[in-house]
Amino acid sequence: MLPKNTKILAIDFDGTIVEDAYPKIGKPILFAFETLKQLQNQGHRLILWTYRSGRKLQEAVDFCNENGIKFYAVNKSYPEEILDNTISRKIHADIFIDDRNFGDLPDWSKIYNTILEDAPKLIAKKKNWFGF
């Protein structure tokens, strides 16, 4: 159980944490790592949620580790999850941060402030699958 007002955040890599240079690793996006560290220090659970796989995925994980971010899980809802390639994959998260959302990726200060402002509202709203 997560502490009150904390979130599970699924975060894309290319174009979100770093500039999109796939298959290479782009330059870090301004304040991305600093914001992620702050969110992690506040108890938010970070999941790396990316298109990358195999060696390219490991390179991204290693790059994040070198920049001070160790993810709770990578392309999974939790570390022990066993993936079944016969079913559609949708991970469990409260917020998905991705440059491919509607519109452009906001700057990381706006992302941070939105998470802090909306955390109590999102937790209060989330009761069960049907919203009761």
Image (cartoon, rainbow, N blue to C red):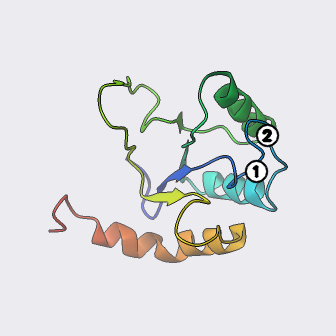
* Quarter of the figure with residue 30: bottom right
Quadrant where the C terminus is found in the figure = bottom left
* Mark 2 surroundings within 10 Å by alpha-carbon count, few (fewer than 14), some (14 through 19), many (20 or more): some
x and y percentages locating residue 76 in the rendered image: 45, 35
The residue wearing badge 2 is 25
* Quarter of the figure with residue 66: top right
Residue at the right extreme, as displayed? 27
Residue 25 in the image: above or below residue 110: above
* Mark 1 surroundings within 10 Å by alpha-carbon count, few (fewer than 14), some (14 through 19), many (20 or more): many
Residue at 73 percent across and 39 percent down: it is 64
Please indicate whether residue 90 sits to the left or right of residue 42 in the image.
left
Residue at 51 percent across and 53 percent down: it is 9
Q: Which mark is residue 3?
A: none
- Circles 2 and 1, Cβ within 8 Å, touching? The answer is yes
Marked residue nearer the N-terminal end (2 or 1):
1
Amino acid at circle 1: Val
Element at label 1: loop
Element at label 2: loop
x and y percentages locating residue 112 in the rendered image: 63, 68
Please indicate whether residue 131 sits to the left or right of residue 26 in the image.
left
Front residue of 30 and 3: 30
Residue at 78 percent across and 53 percent down: it is 19
Residue 51 in the image: above or below residue 7: above
Front residue of 93 and 123: 93
* Quarter of the figure with residue 62: top right
Amino acid at circle 2: Ile
The residue wearing badge 1 is 18
Residue 119 in the image: above or below residue 61: below
- Cα distance in 3D space between marks 2 and 1: 7 Å
Front residue of 108 and 51: 51
